[in-house]
Each structure stands twice: as C-alpha cells, then as structure tokens.
Amino acid sequence: MMHTPVLEEQRRATLARALNLALDKRRQSVAEFPDWEAMRQRAHDIRAGALDRLDEYLNQFERAAAANGIRVVRVATAEEACLYVVAIAKRIGVTTAVKSKSMVTEEIHLNRALETEGIRAMETDLGEYIAQLCGQPPFHLTAPIVHLSRDEVGRILADKLGVPFTNDPTQLTLIARDAMRREFLTARLGISGANFCVAETGSLVLVTNEGNGRMCTTLPAKEGPRVHVAITGIEKVVPALKDVAHLLRLLARSGSGMRLTAYTTLINGPRKRAAGEETTGPDEVHVLLLDNGRRAMLRDPHLREALCCIRCGACSNTCPVYHRIGGHAYQSVYNGPIGSVWSAALWDTEQAATLPFVSSLCGACADICPVKIDIHHALLWQRKLAADRGYTPRWQRLVWWAWRVAMSHPALYGFGSIVARRLFSPAILNRLGKPWTETRDLPPLARKSFHEMWKEEAPK
Ligand code: SF4
C-alpha cells in the first residue's frame, strides 16, 4: 500500500493560498448563475450523451475533419502514439518541437520518447516550461507549478537560464517569453492536445491563458514543411459547437473562477494554399485519437462517467487530501480525486491501483464537479477492484474480514470491543498505525462503547 507523505508546512501554505484563491474566485463566478445546478446537469448530459454514441461521433468527426484537410488517426496505445509523432519529426527533419500544455502527452510520456530519438520537445505553457526546466512533473491538472512561490520561480530561471534573479511576475514572464519566442519563430513541429473535438464541424478546440497554444499551432517558420500534431483521448469528442459553447462557460469558471480562458482557439485544418488564401499556418494537421485504456473504462458502468471529465482541476482545488499532500505525492501524471480514478483505470500497477485509497470520500469533489461526475463512488469502486486484484495487503484484508464477522455477530462485537479497549493503549495504537501515525496521533479508544452508554443513559 502506498504511503503518501504530507507536504512540508511552508509548501502547504503556498499551495493552500493558491487553491483557496481559486475556490473563492470560483464561488464568485458561479454566483452569477442562479441556474448553475441546471447548467451542470446540462454539461453532464452533453458529455454522457457523447459517450453513449461515441463511435458514431468519432466517425462523424473523422469525416468532417478529413473534409477540412486534417488527417485523423486512431491510436490504441501510448507507444503507437509516440512512434507516430517521432516518425513525423524524422520525416520533416526537425530536432525541436514546440509543445502546448497537454495532459495526454504527459500520459504517454511523449517528451521522453522524443528525447530518446534526439528530438527536444519544448514546453511553452509558462508553468509547464518552468516545471520542465526543473525536471518536475505537473503538480496539478491545470496549474503545473501551483506549489512554487515567486522566489522559487525566480531562482529556477536564474539558475537554468543564467539571467539575473527577480521575483517580479511581469519580469519573470518576460524572461520566459523571450526564451520561447525564438523557438516559436523557427519551429516546424507543433504539438498540442485538444480540449474538445467537434463532430459536427471536424474542429479542434484549444483553450489556453497565454496564447502559447496558438503559437504552437500557427508555426510561422519560413523554411521547410510545418506540421501540427494534436494528441487527444477518444472521449474528448462532443456533438456540436453549441455544446462546446456551454462546456466552456463551466470549464474556466470551475477551475480558476475566470469567466472564460483568455484564448479559445478553433482549428479547422491546415493552411489554405490557394492564391490569396492564408499565408501562415501548418502545411499538415494530424489528430491522434488515443484509446490507451479508455474503451475499457467505457465498458465499466462504474467508471464510464469519469470519461466525462473536462479537466478543470476543481476537484483537486477542493479536495482536503490534495491540500495536505499536494500533486506530486500521487506519483502519477493524473493526480487529485479524478486523477486517482483515471490512474487506477489506465495503469495496472500497485501504485496506481492504491491511489483511490488516498481519499477521505467526503464527496467535496463530486459536489464541485461541473459535469457532475460521481467521483467518490468511482473511487470506492476502484478500491473494490484493487482488493479483487490482490493489490491490498493481506493484513488489511484480514482486518476487514474480522470486522465483517464481528459486525454480523453483535455479541462477538461487544466482547471484542471490551477486549480491544483493555489491550490497545494510545501508544500501542500509534505504533500499529504507522506510517499513518508518524505525522498524526490516533485518538484513544473511548472508555465506554456507545451501547454501554445507551444502556446507562437512555430514557427508560
Ligand atoms: S472530475 Fe470534474 S472537477 Fe475534476 S477535473 Fe474533471 S471536470 Fe473538473
């Protein structure tokens, strides 16, 4: 069973400030809509309806995108997706790619695959860029360096780029922008994800707050072929543009409290080359629709809903466990409550399978989710699957078996609770509870059970 360390105090304070600010802004933003609950329900219906007819919408998207000049490819595994991108990079002869923020590319470890082939993938989302500079995975679904202070960011840039130290946010942004601009202007391979794929029009929808998504997909280089590759999960398809309009109203509000992300980009194909048409833009656009375990999730009625996720990050913002341990403790690219559901579904490893236990099951995640995913029940289901697969330790299964037997035999339960209260002092309990009790104390057992108190005090 995985042991999740708590964050050190200062880091936890930085994280709490950022997450609480996002939650406050979300509350204000959501208050603008008296019918927020109805909006959530509609968002749920759009996403669930798209999943119910997934193949139909994927085929429609494929046809419409092809008519726009986009090449759509279905890829079953992470390896297949990486090989495809590497092959493109080799064909057009590039050693650098510019990359917009994409959790799917983190999922398939694309950067590592490219690096192995001598191709450098440069992250261009500011947070991702800094995380890449210091060799860290993203800390949060939408805010990759939410745990770092301004001072820390300043020190990273000074150390890695050899610039004078500053902790002024504007100066920090300008330093990163200067480093990125040169790459944007010469890059011939742009890599992105897609927030949505629109079946009706064959469009890709990208949302960013920095405009880097547009820079990565416009590719203004003067020489040689220019290619944009978008990699996204099959679940990202939605029927029509009007559905995107609705989902966008909930996405940024839920994650950061913004009414809308600063840039919403619709990509409808490569540069049109006829005389007098577009002068900038890629010569080719490829869309990789990735399965990598998603169809198995679709077949499981308890996990299917998790595919509705629009990656707003609100469930992490509100999760008391995430507040305490932070994103890196999950040791998975998908962290937080929904990340635990996804990780356990995508990767059959002990580490991933036990992530759903890193939850208090308080239900705050389900309450905040803009597409009404029943996250804590999905976590419970994943716990059952972990136990079925033998990922829970033998001692734990034994304890639960004993608990079940005792609970179904009241006399045995009563006798057991008397014995336990005599045997287990707080010191023994804390020793038995390690490593959980290394950072907290278990309360002493009550001197009297509820039944005993009831017998004494209940009105006759
Ligand atoms: S599960 Fe819901 S709250 Fe969490 S990231 Fe996905 S859409 Fe947002």
Image (cartoon, rainbow, N blue to C red):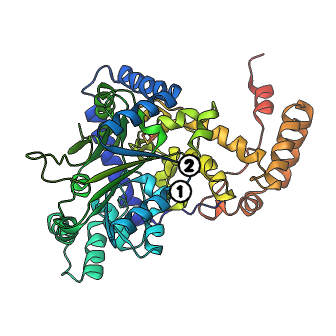
**Left or right of 407 on screen, residue 64:** left
Residue at left 30%, top 47%? Answer: 21
Residue under numbered circle 1 = 80
Q: Amino acid at mark 2?
A: Ala
* CA separation in Å, label 2 and label 1: 7 Å
Q: Is mark 1 within 8 Å of ligand 1?
A: no
Q: Is residue 135 visible?
A: yes
Q: Position of residue 117 (x, y in %)?
A: 45, 74
Q: Kindly state the secondary structure of the residue where label 1 is placed.
A: helix
Report the front residue among 102 and 84. 84
**Left or right of 438 on screen, residue 184:** left
Residue at left 48%, top 60%? Answer: 82
Residue at left 72%, top 58%? Answer: 433
Farthest residue to the left: give it: 276
Label 1 Cα neighbours within 10 Å, binned few <14 / some 14-19 / many ≥20: some
Q: Quadrant of residue 171?
A: bottom left
Q: Position of residue 359 (x, y in %)?
A: 58, 46
Residue under numbered circle 2 = 76
**Left or right of 360 on screen, residue 65:** left
